[in-house]
Amino acid sequence: MKNTIVLGTVRSGTSMTTAMFRKTRAYFGDDIMTPTIANPYGYYECHQINRLNNRLIQRIIYGFTSKKIQSFLKPFQPPVHRDRRCSMLAAPRYIRQFSLPEDITDQMRHFVSHTPFCLKDPRFSITLPFWRSVIPKGTRFLVVFRDPRRTVDSMLRNSREIYNPPLPVDEEWGLKLWYRNYRRLLYQFSNEEDWFFIHDEQVFSGKAVPALEKFVETPLATDLIDPKIRRSRPRKLDSLNEQYYRCNDLFEQLKQRARRDLEKWLN
């Protein structure tokens, strides 16, 4: 099996896709998140990797400023960036570059030393450039995406049902998050042979499974793929503003890329 990094925003089908690796030899991390009502079959995410990526995201947003200065800057940040529970919903406009502290690099090396691995965290859509130096050559990158309206519907449902108080995410931020992260993945990160973009509908239909098995070079388990567990719906947006049209255009580009990748790996 090829080492695999699973990317995509929260509520985009990444857990369902990663669950297909559960019967392989893949290493998912040391401290795996437990299932919730939102993901009854599990997240396949490691708490320690999440915390590590949280540290990176805080530095991307605030740099190396002191806690006192961060407190001063917080009121000028979006509500999601001010709430430490929301790192998986972060959407910085730019990725601030900085040298990694040695302790962070050592932790990264620990996780990628367990091969073959299948590591999944929505934060990778932001922090991946910092992992590049330690990720072994030949690692595969799998990007899972979903209709932005369905994704936003699921984000908002999750923010209310799982968290108390609810997370400060709204429709506008959900679309912005979806657009910024997938645009970055498509145009900045994926100009190599070892990337595969997959629409979640291709997983539900089973159409993508043979190509995905060739991509990661191992048989996958499909018994948990069940369209009936989907609770999200294509959300009727409050306003069809410019952000929505940008997302819709990017969604079409992602589907086009997914069709090309599927055809490539089926042949």
Image (tube, rainbow, N blue to C red):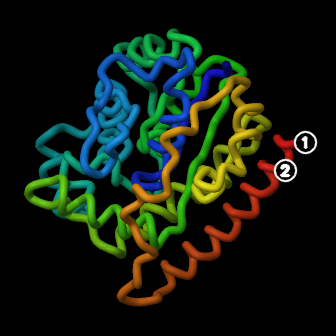
For the C terminus, the quadrant is: top right
Q: Residues within 10 Å of mark 2 (few under 14, many from 20)?
A: few
> Where residue 67 sits in the image (x, y, percent)?
15, 39
Q: Is residue 245 above or below residue 220?
A: below
> Where residue 213 sits in the image (x, y, percent)?
71, 32
Q: Is residue 264 above or below residue 48?
A: below
Q: Which mark is residue 70?
A: none
For the N terminus, the quadrant is: top right
> Where residue 111 sits in the image (x, y, percent)?
45, 16
Describe the element under mark 1 as helix, strand or loop.
loop
Q: Residue at x 36, y 75 (%)?
A: 172
Q: Judge by depth and name the residue closer to the eye, 191 or 122.
A: 122
> Where residue 242 sits in the image (x, y, percent)?
51, 84
Describe the element under mark 2 as helix, strand or loop.
helix
Amino acid found under the numbered disc labelled 1: Asn
Q: CA distance from mark 1 to mark 2?
A: 6 Å
Side of 262 relative to 101 (left or right): right
Q: Judge by depth and name the residue closer to the eye, 135 or 97.
A: 135
Q: In this view of the protein, can residue 3 be seen by the observer?
A: yes
Amino acid found under the numbered disc labelled 2: Glu
Q: Is residue 127 above or below residue 27?
A: below
Q: Residue at x 25, y 50 (%)?
A: 37
Q: Which mark is residue 267?
A: 1
Q: Quadrant of residue 45?
A: top left
Q: Judge by depth and name the residue closer to the eye, 3 or 53.
A: 3
Q: Residue at x 58, y 21 (%)?
A: 135
Mark 1 and mark 2 residues within 8 Å of each other at the beta carbon: yes
Q: In this view of the protein, can residue 134 be seen by the observer?
A: no
Q: Which mark is residue 263?
A: 2
